[in-house]
Amino acid sequence: MWLYTDTVTEHFQNPRNVGEIENADGIGDVGSLACGDALRLTLKIDNERIVDAKFKTFGCASAIASSSALTEMIKGMEISEAEKITNEDIANYLGGLPKEKMHCSVMGREALEAAIADYRGLALPTAEGEVVCECFGVTDIEITRAIKESNLRSVEEITNFTKAGGGCGKCADKLVALLRKSVSEGLKIVDPAVKPTRMTTLQKIKKIEEVLDREVRPGLRVDGGDLELIDVDGDLVIVSMRGHCTSCSNSQTTIKQLVEKKLREQVLPTLIVEEDK
Amino acid sequence: MDKVVYMDNNATTRVAPEVLEVMTPYFSELYGNPSSMHTFGGQVGRSIDTAREQVASLLGCDPSEIVFTSCGTESDSTAIFSGLRANPDKRHVVSSRVEHPAVKNLCENLPARTSTSYRTTMLKVSGDGLIDFDEYLEALNDDTAIVSIMWANNETGVVYPIPEMAKAAKERGIMFHTDAVQAVGKIPINLNQLDIDFLSMSGHKLHAPKGVGILYVRRGTPFAPFMAGGHQEHGRRAGTENVASIVGLGKACELAAQKMAEENSRVKALRDKLENGLLSRIPRSILNGNKEQRLPNTSNISFEFVEGEAILLHMNRYNICASSGSACTSGSLEPSHVLRAMGVPFTAAHGSIRFSLSVYNTEEEVDFVLDKMPAIIAELRELSPFWPGA
């Protein structure tokens, strides 16, 4: 049985914004019956702002919850802001998803992109790539993007995020090649960012607080929880859980898989996050 | 309804109270090792003999033909590897596409597991899950070392003509194994009158605990132990016996013999009521598997345009337990290999639910499920972009 967060369960049991907007300004259709999940997102757009969003989803609990969360996130948002939403944002809004279910959040982001592209009358760039996974029709562009955005490091992780390789498995070699290519390119890009490892403690605290405010706290607050930065000692970051998070059995997972991951990506790759006991 | 409505008995069953009762002393005062010389241990050994007789009685064989193992999977592997070793010059195995992973994954990976180039024929099944008997006969040849076909399918409940298949193998000098994990206790079995060389069964599918199984090895059938070690089970299965579970399995077999008539009458009637009720109350619902050649307790139904995990989680809110052949429930991304082998379309395979009953189910529970399911399916269909409307 999957361990879903209370937010996922709540959105699954009481999905928001179900339905289809008539005469929608943007329609995003992704997935298929064969794939086991599919999402139709319809948007009402007024003056470059999403004034309404509705969805219909065929899929498991996390697919339904991801769709519901997405519509809640984007309603009232400027399109330019909505374009910045990543699958990780959707997963974070839900307090996290099991790793095997991350593709549900990717489906949400893809539907949003498709709907915006439809509104603008543009073709989707990801659809133009070469299909690598025949079973699920995943292109090299989609896979490379997922590798870079979610910092994927194995074929298994690629499958969890994009479904590629989850069918017959014949494309595994191609996935490894894409992984190698992305990682080698990625290192070149990451290098300059890694170099200024000498940050003052004050700089670190400021940067950590920024990332926590932007990437972590909004998701926790949905669940009635919060997180406080207690201390920064070298690479050791001490945090304390607040509100509902203090009694949550998943708090350790949240700290390691959400907080530490975000801080390593956006502040310093060497940081270690521990809970204040 | 606060209590659990358990309709997932092909996954596992509750331990019968009578079984638990006979097991308990072996966790406390009767802790001796059956291999010991003293009376204290020896009495434990005698209780294993009794269990062996109870199992043999249910299967219609001699107690000496029963080997206790840890599970159905161990029994399957032991049987198939034994068959291959007994026929070192033969390089062909016949099985089916709807086998349990314990057999399927082994048969499909024999070259890697044995460092020998085996050829495997995985027999096709029809739309309702049956194997074509002529195709089966055609698959058998001089090079075939062993056949392994399940007696009843765990997902659909479809029953295969094992007595006839075993006879055809025997006539051609081919060894025959059957995974009877789902069949034992539901279908009368009399091994003395059949041509089966190996039969696997598992305790936890018939109200004994998890962690114990048996392998029937026909007298005179060449046998090679799976593990090296001590002399237990007359040198056929090394390792100190799981005494409490073996005693429990013996008792469970005795109970199964007593309750087989009830399985095929009362439980079957409950299953039929559930199945007919769901199919008539819920539009676009389809029965998977042959309706006639089927276990009395199993019903596999597809609800088109909705996904199995979502259905199960809504059922879970009412404490109704069942299984799905959907991709999402397993962590794999493809729906059940059994339904795919049957050619069930994807519109239906992802929304398949397996209900499997036992003698502990009641009519009240069936009515409860019939009351809840239509709204669950309707609610999810409202969400589905594929639902064309009733």
Image (cartoon, coloured by chain):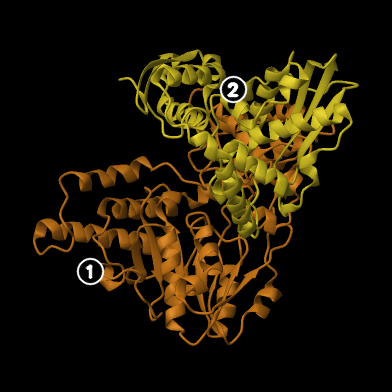
- The secondary element bearing badge 1 is classed as loop
* Residue B57 in view in this figure: no
Q: Where is residue B282 in the image (x, y as percent from the top left)?
A: 75, 34
Discs 1 and 2 lie in a common subunit? no
Q: For mark 1, what is the residue?
A: B230
Q: For mark 2, what is the residue?
A: A93
B35 in relation to A189, above or below:
below
Judged left or right of residue A140, residue B270 is left
Report which quarter residue B13 is drawn in. Answer: top left
Q: How many labels does the image show?
A: 2
Chain A drawn in what color?
yellow
Pointer 1: residues within 10 angstroms few (<14), some, or many (20+)?
few
Task: Give the chain letter at badge 2.
Answer: A
Quadrant placement of the C terminus of chain A? top left
Q: Position of residue A242 (x, y in %)?
A: 42, 13
Chain B drawn in what color?
orange
- Which residue is more in the foreground, B276 or B1? B1
